[in-house]
């Protein structure tokens, strides 16, 4: 897939789902990466509760 194809896909998704919002809470791309990895294993609600603690453990211990 080249960049133009990717842009077209994103544009089409925005047309189909104009009000789509990410339900994961994050402040940085790294936090989003951690949250997405966790979301494959549990609910977004649980991910949003646990991600801040995991980030603190990664950076502050």
Image (cartoon, grey):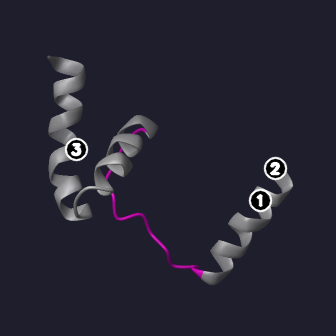
- Residue at the spot x=64%, y=73% of the render? 14
Q: Is residue 14 left or right of residue 8?
A: left
Which SS does the magenta portion mostly show?
loop
Q: Is residue 5 left or right of residue 13?
A: right
Q: Is residue 8 above or below residue 39?
A: below
Q: Residues within 10 Å of mark 3 (few under 14, many from 20)?
A: many
- Dot 1 corresponds to which residue? 7
- Dot 3 corresponds to which residue? 51
Answer yes or no: do the residues labelled 1 and 2 have beta carbons within 8 Å?
Answer: yes
Which quadrant holds the C terminus?
A: top left
- Residue at the spot x=33%, y=56% of the render? 40
- Dot 2 corresponds to which residue? 3
Which x, y percent locates residue 10? 69, 65
First along the sequence among labels 2 and 3: 2
Region in magenta? 17-28
First along the sequence among labels 3 and 1: 1
**SS of the residue at dot 2?**
helix
Distance in Å between CA atoms under marks 1 and 2: 6 Å
Which x, y percent locates residue 18? 58, 79
Is-magenta flag for residue 25?
Answer: yes
Which x, y percent locates residue 6? 75, 57
């Amino acid at each position: 897939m080249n960049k133009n194809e990717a842009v077209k896909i994103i544009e089409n998704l925005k047309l189909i789902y104009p009000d789509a919002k990410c339900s994961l809470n994050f402040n940085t791309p790294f936090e989003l990466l951690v949250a997405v990895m966790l979301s494959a294993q549990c609910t977004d609600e649980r991910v949003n509760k646990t991600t801040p603690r995991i980030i603190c453990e990664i950076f502050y211990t």
